[in-house]
Amino acid sequence: MTVTMTATDWLALLTHFLSLSLLAVGGAITTAPDMHRYLVNEQHWLSDGQFSSSIALAQAAPGPNVLFIALLGWNVGMNAGGGIGAGALAWSYAALGVLLAMIGIMLPSTTLTFTVARWGHQNRELRAVRAFKQGMAPIVIALLIATGWILAASHGSAVKNWTLWLVTGLTALLVWRTRLHMLWLLATGGLLGWFGWV
């Protein structure tokens, strides 16, 4: 996939991640639906497969889950540079994409979190502070559900891929109703994929 990006487009990429940073309550992954809307549907800088693969790869890798932002920026830069085989220009654009995406997602939220956490700790007994903390829980849950929906929808219709949807539903039920460790569920999903059953 090759895209053409101007300086204005690079600035738009930075400003979009700057704005999403302030909405990343519950982590950067909660803003994935809006990233998908912007990068895939509106700007067409990434394909649906690149977007989903970036998240899947970063979530499977050890380290902070914000790594998917770096991969999204990398893929935007690679696409702008003409692909992995295009040489040094593509690699330079990829590095620029990583830099802009990571600065955008990290700078506002880190600054705000540092400032608010200090204030919140000093005023933790205030009713408004306690209410804010309790009110954020349903918002984070809804954002995580929306992220899951976007990632699941990229695999096609429920009728066509009914086995994926069945495994997803069973996994959600097991997480909700049992104390089964997540690693067992991940291993089971990996084995089902390995054998081609899903």
Image: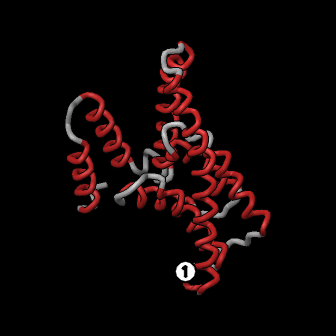
Residue 11 in the figure: left or right of residue 79: right
Where is residue 181 drawn, in percent x and y? 21, 40
Residue 182 vertical position relative to residue 45 in the rendered view, above or below: above
Q: Which residue is mark 1?
A: 84
Q: Is residue 143 left or right of residue 90?
A: left
Q: Residue at x 57, y 68 (%)?
A: 75
Residue at (69, 51) in percent of width and height: 16
User: Is residue 109 left or right of 147 when viewed as pictured?
Assistant: right
Q: Residue furthest top?
A: 127
| Residue 77, x across and y down, in percent | 62, 70
Q: How many numbered callouts?
A: 1
Residue positioned most to the front? 122
Q: Secondary structure at mark 1?
A: helix
* Label 1, residues with CA under 10 Å away: few <14, some 14-19, many ≥20: some
Query: Which residue is nearer to you in this view: 11 or 85?
Result: 11
Find residue 100 and report its image quarter: bottom right
Give me the residue at 63% from left, 46% from top: 108
- Residue at screen point 25% across, 55% down: 192
**Along the viewing direction, whichever of 102 and 122 lies nearer the viewer:** 122
Asked whether, in this view, residue 177 is left or right of residue 7, the answer is left
Q: Position of residue 89 (x, y in %)?
A: 64, 82
Residue 1 seen anywhere in this rendered image of the structure: no
Disc 1 marks a residue whose amino acid type is: Ile
